[in-house]
Amino acid sequence: AQSVTQPDIHITVSEGASLELRCNYSYGATPYLFWYVQSPGQGLQLLLKYFSGDTLVQGIKGFEAEFKRSQSSFNLRKPSVHWSDAAEYFCAVGARTGFQKLVFGTGTRLLVSP
Amino acid sequence: KAGVTQTPRYLIKTRGQQVTLSCSPISGHRSVSWYQQTPGQGLQFLFEYFSETQRNKGNFPGRFSGRQFSNSRSEMNVSTLELGDSALYLCASSPSTGGDIYEQYFGPGTRLTVT
């Protein structure tokens, strides 16, 4: 069974600084990987996805993520954080079974300081 | 296209009652999945429906059930509500055609409070 670990519960970043959120997954084959963002009281918005091919994927809002098979990681990055990026970020893994089941990490809450 | 819609957005129920939540997927999407989000357990998969058939089910008791209609709209039902069922219930739709995994698009959720 697949699983996801997001080791950082909270991260505080100054506005304008760079950001990296960590995600490690466990899955026996090449997984499908996703990053979602959730603002308070809202649903989840898809930031980006990795299915195959280029290991560096670009998403919306200036986010990117890199798939590293050797480290079982899919870290999310942004070169310059804006105050509006404050939210909770979830990494998720899906199995290549055809079923639309995602397994989510516990999330990382991003705080942006002025 | 309009996004995933869920109704109602907020619901307060009493222990022992039952509740039905509704989800309308993005037009053209035939796969609908449901997730429960709580502070203690995080996001957990409930079940997925595709073309009116349940394809996959998470590890939840039989009190949790769902169905999908021919227009892909889906409902989930929770019977004999317990305090621990208080959660944000999220519905997601995907353009899955049945053969592979696709990205899922989430609705705003239904906040259920059980008192």
Image (cartoon, grey):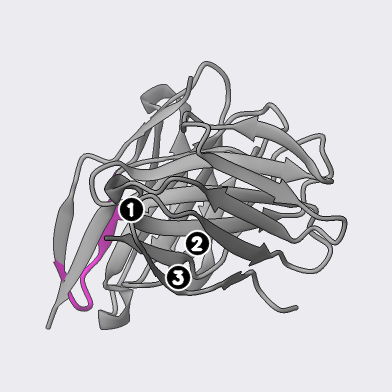
Identified at 58% across, 25% down, the residue is A30
Nearer-the-camera pick, A88 or B55: B55
Q: Return the residue at label 3.
A: A62
Label 2: how many Cα within 10 Å (few below 14, some 14–19, many 20+): many
Does residue A113 appear to the left or right of B3 in the view shown?
left
Looking at the picture, does residue B91 appear above or below residue B65?
below
Residue A4 position, x and y percent, is 37, 34
- Magenta span has A18? yes
Residue A54 seen: no
| Cα distance in 3D space between marks 1 and 2 | 37 Å
Part of the protein shown in magenta: A13-22
* Disc 2 element: strand
Nearer-the-camera pick, B98 or A30: B98
Identify the amino acid type marked 3: Gly
Mark 2 or mark 3: whose residue is earlier in sequence:
2
Q: Return the residue at label 1.
A: B15
Q: Return the residue at label 2.
A: A47
* Disc 1 element: loop
Residue B98 position, x and y percent, is 82, 38
Looking at the picture, does residue A55 appear above or below residue B107?
above
Mark whose residue sits in front, 1 or 2: 1
Mark whose residue sits in front, 1 or 3: 1
Nearer-the-camera pick, A94 or B45: B45
Identify the amino acid type marked 2: Leu
Identified at 65% across, 32% down, the residue is B56
**In which quadrant is the C terminus of chain A drawn?**
bottom left
Residues at marks 2 and 3 on the same chain: yes
Residue at the far top in the pictured view: A28
Nearer-the-camera pick, B34 or A88: B34
| Cα distance in 3D space between marks 2 and 3 | 9 Å
Identify the amino acid type marked 1: Arg
